[in-house]
Image (spheres, rainbow, N blue to C red):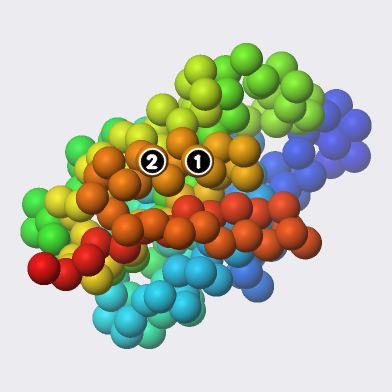
Amino acid sequence: MVERRVAGLPLEQVLGWAEFCGLRIAVDAGVFVPRRRTEFLVRQGVALARPGDIVVDLCCGAGAIGAALAAAVDQAEVHAVDIDPAAVRCARRNVPGHVYLGDLYQPLPARLRGRVGILAANVPYVPTGEIGFLPPEARAYEPLVALDGGSDGLDVLRRVAAGAASWLAPGGHLLIETSDRQVPLALAAFAASGLTAHVATAADLDATVVIGALTPG
C-alpha cells in the first residue's frame, strides 16, 4: 500500500474507500475520488429535500452524493447515473438505489419525468486547457471524463441544465458544483433552461454550488 501511494495513487484508491458525509464510500482504482468540498452540495440538497423525494445523482462517480442523500433524506428514492463503467460498478456498491450506465438523462426511466425533487450533479468543470495544472494524482489516476469540462469547463453543466426542467417536479431543485469564476456563465445556463437560480458558497471548503428551482406554474 505504501508503494502504491508513493507511486502517486490517491490515498482513497489505495485504501479502497473515502470518508464522505460520515459514510465509508468504496472507491476503486481508476474511479473519481469524492471531494470533501462536495459535502457542501449534499448539505444544500438535504435542506431542500422532502421525505420521499425522488433523488437523482448525475455524473455520480462512486455514488457518494447519492449515498449521502439516501442516508439523510427519509424514504428517498435514489437513482444515479455515470458514463464510466468502472464508476457504475463502484457506485452499485455504495448507492442504496438504482445505478445506470449511460450519458446523463438517457438511461433514466421515463416514469421519473416531471417527478424528481432533487437533481444533483457533480459535473466535470475543469477547462480542457487547465487539466495539465491539476495535481499529478488526479491527472494520472482519475478518469479524464470526470475532470474535463470542455473549453470553458461548462459543457456538461449546460447539458444538465438544459434537460433539467423536463425531469424536475414543480418546486424541485437542480444543484451543480462549479467554481467561483464560472458562476456568471453557470447562472446564465440555468436561466436559459427556465430555472430560477442562486449561488451558495462555503469559504472553508472552497465550495460553490449553483441551485436552480423549477417554479410551479
Along the viewing direction, whichever of 178 and 196 lies nearer the viewer: 196
Q: Which numbered dot is residue 184? A: 1
Q: CA distance from mark 1 to mark 2?
A: 6 Å
Left or right position of 123 against 107: right
Look at label 2 and name its amino acid.
Answer: Ala
Above or below 91: residue 117: below
Left or right position of 45 against 139: left
- Residue 138 drawn at (x, y percent): 70, 31
Residue lying at 72% horizontally and 53% vertically, measured from the top left: 206
Above or below 29: residue 122: below
Along the viewing direction, whichever of 56 and 9 lies nearer the viewer: 56
Residue 191 appears in the picture as rendered? yes
Q: Residues within 10 Å of mark 1 (few under 14, many from 20)?
A: few
Q: Which numbered dot is residue 204? A: none
- Residue 171 drawn at (x, y percent): 24, 71
Look at label 1 and name its amino acid.
Answer: Pro
- Residue 91 drawn at (x, y percent): 45, 51
Left or right position of 155 against 109: right
Residue lying at 34% horizontally and 46% vertically, measured from the top left: 190
Above or below 74: residue 83: above
Along the viewing direction, whichever of 202 and 148 lies nearer the viewer: 202
Q: Which numbered dot is residue 188? A: 2
Q: Are marks 1 and 2 in contact (CB under 8 Å)?
A: yes
Q: Considering the numbered disc 2 on the image, is that residue within a helix, a strand or a loop?
A: helix
Image quadrant of residue 53?
A: bottom left
Left or right position of 172 against 8: left
> Quadrant of the image for the N terminus?
top right
Residue lying at 45% horizontally and 69% vertically, measured from the top left: 45
Q: Considering the numbered disc 1 on the image, is that residue within a helix, a strand or a loop?
A: helix
- Residue 120 drawn at (x, y percent): 40, 56
Residue 84 appears in the picture as rendered? no
